[in-house]
Amino acid sequence: MMLADPSKKYRRMYQRVDLPDRQWPNNEITKAPIWMSTDLRDGNQAIFEPMNMEQKFKMFKMLVKIGFKHIEIGFPSASQIDFDFTRMLIEENHIPDDVYIEVLVQARDHLIERTFEALAGAKRAIVHIYNSNSPTFRQKVLNVDVNGAKQLAVNAAQKVKEYAAQYPETDWIFQYSPECFSATELEVAKEVCDAVTEIWDAHPDHKVILNLPATVEVSTPNVYADQIEWMHRNLARRDGVIISVHCHNDRGCGIAASELAIMAGADRVEGCVFGNGERTGNVDVAAIALNMYTQGVAPELDFSNINEVIATVEECTGLPVHPRHPYAGDLVFTAFSGSHQDAIKKGFEYQKNEEIWDMPYLPIDPKDLGRDYDAVIRVNSQSGKGGIAYLLESNYNVVLPRRLQIEFSQVVQQYTDENGTEISAKQIWTLFKDTYVEVKNHHYTVKNYKLSDINGTQIIELEIDVEGETQQLRGEGNGPISAFLNALQLPIDVLNYEERSISSGANAKALTLIELQVKGTGRGSFGAGVHDNTVTSSIEAIIACTNRLIDQGVLSTDQVVAAAV
């Protein structure tokens, strides 16, 4: 049960940072950091069933394809499968020349030795050692003081340096992480990190990585940014250090913390493609990269086929990507709300002629990620006419006049209310045809017609069923439509008439939309016809609309006056 006064049980887990002249709030992200994927290590250790060799290799190839240059491939001193995987990548020459593989190892002599055995023969590799210096770990886990914690790091750094000298053919980068950095006193973290970089002789031509992790997220992102900026300003040999950040997501702020850390001086970001990792996960690298992309900053990672990336991650980890996951989820480019749909529909009209992406509700063009626009607008009971009209136009080239949009949206609304489900573009098109084309009650049915032209006058002769009774009608007019209406002799006026092709090729079909009004009533309705012959399409639209007017009680078949042929 939650406490009424949580201060009796919980306290702030970080120290305030004295940084009155902090600079990071005024900075912007203008270039991509170095990215390091830990999907194969931190991500792999946090799933129900760790990846097998085949899955690891598939994940590795995907990470290379995306563009990662630093890839943490495992913990070979602690896992035989990680050891074997490391050897396989090296011996079978699967590592591109510009990619550094990285392995993690605890600050213990025999584990460091085993790690270098795993990396023997690698062209480029990062050896990553770590130990915690936080008060909680010093007191409750390691039972050491600050000097004791520092000595663990110093001893490990010395061993790494010695073993690396035995493999001069490899381009080595050394990395040290003061685990739980964000919960460690800054002076302590600096003291330990400086001792490590001194042993490793960090300088601009031989840079080392200092990874400053939020192993557990314990503060708001601004506090973490202050911590990073303080280290950025105060570390010794800063020009020989790559500051890396590794943010977990315990408070749900891993992305924000990483972004502010970049603004505060971080050079490198560690994380998993979609944020997999211990507990609530590591930072979501794809989200940070695409956040940059939407601000015009090249992320140097390629998510042009994000669906392929999703499929690989889901297959290898057994974890689904959430439908609302930033940029990747099935629903992130989807609008159900009527007002959102209307805004997007209008935005697309302007976007056709604009180079800069500026769309309501869509911060990124789905096509940049290999997605299409099919799922951008989806219709349920909360949707409006804009979304319905957009789906018909984008999928079937059917453009509805505004009054018909309003009328048909009520038909769709009734359908979704009754069924309680989303309705697809195909279902909307079927519902449209059932409502306006293939009208249920056939009070009027044209059996056949003949059209001729005499001195510019169009003459139509037709055989028509009226409530099952066959009649022969004849009409004249300045065009086929007026001739047909004159043949019917009904008290109706044409308020609106539109015709367009809804397919292409030799057998392209025409769609006719017509709005008729019964004279003297002010009441009217719509009808539609679909046929590869434009005249037939128009006749079908008039008949469909007439039948609807009769169903609505506005028109009666008794009003038909047959004209003798």
Image: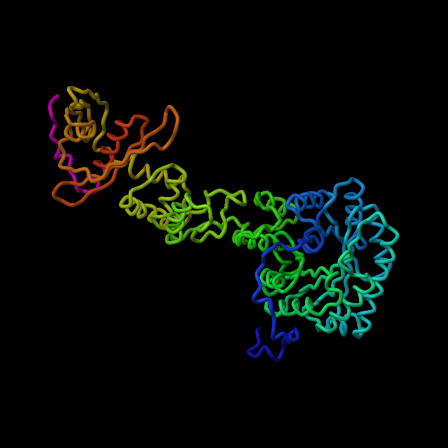
Front-most of residues 257 and 28: 28
Which span is picked out in magenta? 548-565
- Which quarter of the picture shows residue 8? bottom right
- At 21% across and 21% down in the image, what residue appears? 450
421 in relation to 239, above or below: above
- What main secondary structure does the magenta stretch of the protein show? loop
Quarter holding the N terminus?
bottom right
Color theme of the render: rainbow
Q: Is residue 451 magenta?
A: no
Q: Where does residue 493 sit, x and y in percent of width and height?
A: 16, 38
Q: Where does residue 437 sit, x and y in percent of width and height?
A: 29, 35
Q: Where does residue 19 sit, x and y in percent of width and height?
A: 63, 74
- Which quarter of the picture shows residue 209? bottom right
Q: Is residue 549 magenta?
A: yes
**Quick check: 68 left or right of 208?**
left
Front-most of residues 554 and 147: 147
Front-most of residues 470 and 274: 274
